[in-house]
Amino acid sequence: NDSRNGTSASQSVRTWARAAALMGANKVLAIAGGSEFNQEVVINGWSGSTIGYYGSGPRPLFRWSTIFTSGWEFVRTITGVTNRAVYRIPLGALPQSTPYAAARVTHATIVIVNDSQVLTWYARNGQAEIGGRSRTDMFWHTATSGYLYFSCVGTVTRVEVPYGDPFRIGNSTGFTIQDMMFGGSRGHAMIAEGNQSDYLITRCHARRFGVSGFYLQLRNGAATNGIRALRNLAEYGHA
């Protein structure tokens, strides 16, 4: 209930937007176990603050993606490749993607199949290209049909299409985050960056990302820049 004041478990608020509005420097944000946020979260100016969780259930999850557990269609098998086939799923517009300056590549994104198979999509005029060659046997999207095509080894049980990086923290000296899960990311599952920032990141897990689980970028070489501690972190590969 976002009309509450957020000062205790009995007064907890519902949305990230409301929680963020109540936060700032030198405060504690406790997130209920089992919570899930599907959006882009950007934190700035929370110096001296802590994010953790309370209650029971799994670690709170930050992701930014669309998840399908049904709705795909079999298209065809791939000749000469054992147990791999092409499927398609209605997606509409292509997910927000990263512009590329290369002559033959204009955009890139990823699709995650069954929590384990990550396919990177490089596009030129709506057609996947890898190594400068058209790859209709891998992964592509056609804007005119509104379908996302992908290949999979074995039976498809889950498809996740990330839209961006779900969690970014910057310019928050003395910030602590613990016991969180990050994933469903096109690039980095969790990004920590900024000037004169000193972070403690502990007991956090990252999974289902396209590039890296934890991306740490400190700028300008200021003497106080640094990661205070990284403790008990886990990256589950690209899945």
Image: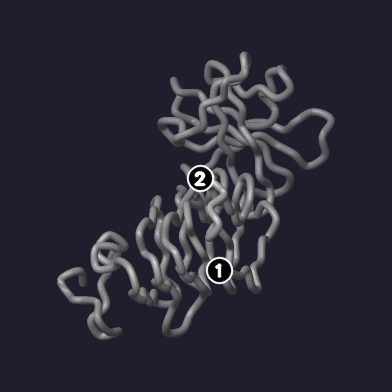
Looking at the image, is mark 1 or mark 2 nearer the viewer?
1
Quadrant of the frame with the C terminus: bottom right
Is residue 52 rendered to the left or right of residue 228?
left
Report the number of numbered marks. 2
Q: Nearer the viewer, residue 167 or 200?
A: 200
Q: Residue at x 70, y 37 (%)?
A: 85
Residue indicated by mark 2 = 162
Residue at the spot 44% in from the left edge and 28% down from the top edge: 146
- Image location (x, y in percent) of residue 220: 53, 46
Q: Residue tagged by mark 1?
A: 201
Q: What residue type is labelled 2?
A: Pro
Placement of 124 over or under 227, stated as above or below: above
Q: Of label 1 and label 2, which has the lower sequence position?
A: 2
Instruction: Give coordinates of residue 124: x percent, y percent.
Output: 57, 18
- Residue at mark 1 to residue at mark 2: CA–CA distance: 24 Å
Q: State which quadrant residue 127 falls in.
A: top right
Q: Closest to the observer: 53 or 94?
A: 53
Tell me the residue at 58%/39% (across/down).
110
Q: Quadrant location of residue 86?
A: top right
Residue 108, which numbered label?
none
Amino acid at dot 1: Ile
Q: Position of residue 185 (x, y in %)?
A: 53, 49
Q: Of 225 and 81, which appears nearest the observer?
A: 225
Tag 2: Cα neighbours inside 10 Å, few (<14), some, or many (≥20)?
Answer: many
Above or below, 110 relative to 49: above
- Callout 2: SS: strand
**Residue 72 vertical position relative to residue 226 in the rendered view, above or below:** above
